[in-house]
Amino acid sequence: MNKFAIIALDGLGLQELDRLAEFSTFLAGIRRNYVFAQTESNILSNTATGWATLLTALDWPDHTCSGFAKPVRSLLNLQVVDERQLPQKSLRLLGQTASRETMLINIPLVLPGDRIWLSDGTVPVQTRFSPELLSKKHPEINSYQPCGWLNCNKPPVELLREAISTEILRLQLAADLTQSQRPALSVVRAAIFDVAGHLIGPQFYSRKFQVELSSIGHALDALAHALKCADMIVLMISSYSFENCLQVVNLNHLLAGGGFCRMSPHSRTARMIALEGLGNRHARWTIVPSKSSAYSPTHGTVYLNRKSRYDDGTVCESQSSSLAETILNYLTTVCEQRYGLDFSGKTYPQSDLPDVAFRLRGADYTCSDNADPFDRPAGVHCPRGFLAFPPGLRNLDKEMGLCTAGQKLCQAVEG
Ligand SMILES: [Zn+2]
């Protein structure tokens, strides 16, 4: 049976891949020899939603994952989403290999199980590594911080430098583990292009960052060498890319302005709430639930404060569908009139989904005014990504939705 390595470079578009290939013989070879398809993500275009699609080959909203977290019991209590909240037994991408033969490095949503696993880097969880005994062979893991650069008030270039060292360590670990554990399936996700996209924006691929690009290129080459020695067939995916951030919009201030929620003076960012939520503690207040009918806790979502869903809910089921439409119309109008931004959205009646999912083209959303760099980003996600297969493996159309890309990956791995 063939052994596959899926290398994920989330945050890169084809243009950025070409630039990075100037610093990596591995990527230059892939660009020259592989078959490429451009992919288009869903309306939310966030990392967790995209990975839910790649892992399950189900599209949004069928896999129900709208982001890295969702409110549970109260709009203020965010719970980090993982594979247990996806539809039962839907991790089709990982289905064919025994757990212990599967290596997952920095993949959103998946839990360790018996897998060779290095923490999900999309939320600021503590260092974790599985199985534990691997940390004896790889002591460098003891100092690994999946995203130690988050939530600190350093200049973007300094944060970038820290994120690059993390990435280089992560890619080295992936190379070492490939050699020592000989997995049958590896999925390795570099997070650096997402970090750089938010902190620096598309400018990261300019001459100014040659040294940085070159160090990442070399680390990818070392991983590619290990994969080649282990006879693994490399497949490549990027589930989104970046574009310049034109505007930062505080969605909850807009909702408050429309009378849909009451804000408290000390608002905190969604990521900070998630951090606190991880310890299963109640997050600090951002809105007053008893005075609020809707809230946007994560990028691209609005949840109604439904009585049927939350202990401190205020909205009756009979009101919910018309209220969701009213909010969608209000946000569309105000984003167009006030910011000149294209706001596209959709409402969902199902109770396990946000009531509104939206995309604010070229804009990022914030729920606080503090200096978290993720709330003052240089770039924002753009739904365009790519899929690359070795020639002759499967037919790829030049353009496809991310769900089709997920299906193609599953089919390839299933043989
Ligand atoms: Zn991102």
Image (cartoon, helix red, strand yellow):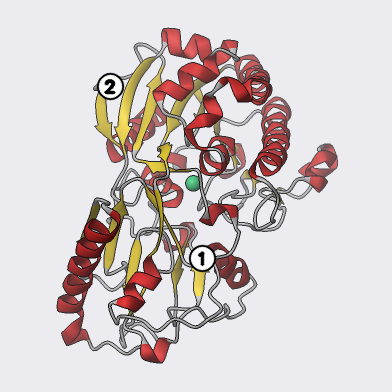
Residue 218 occupies quadrant: top right
Which residue has dot 1 on it? 270
Q: Residue furthest front?
A: 338
At label 2, the amino acid type is Leu
Q: Nearer the viewer, residue 368 or 397?
A: 368
The residue mark sitting in front, 2 or 1, is: 1
Q: Nearer the viewer, residue 233 or 274?
A: 274
Q: Earlier in the sequence, mark 2 or mark 1?
A: 1
At label 1, the amino acid type is Ala
Q: Residues within 10 Å of mark 2 (few under 14, many from 20)?
A: some
Report x, y in % for residue 206.
54, 23
Q: Taking 305 as reference, is 184 left or right?
A: right
Which residue has dot 2 on it? 396
Report x, y in % for residue 199.
57, 43
Residue 334 occupies quadrant: bottom left
Q: Residue at x 24, y 50 (%)?
A: 342
Disc 1: residue Cβ within 8 A of ligand 1's nearest atom = no
Q: Residue at x 23, y 72 (%)?
A: 327
Element type at mark 1: helix
Q: Nearer the viewer, residue 166 or 55?
A: 166
Report x, y in % for residue 208.
61, 24
Element type at mark 2: loop
Quarter of the image with the C terminus is: top left
Q: CA distance from mark 2 to mark 1?
A: 37 Å
Confirm whether residue 311 shows in the render: no
Q: Taking 230 as reference, is 132 left or right?
A: right
Confirm whether residue 29 shows in the render: yes
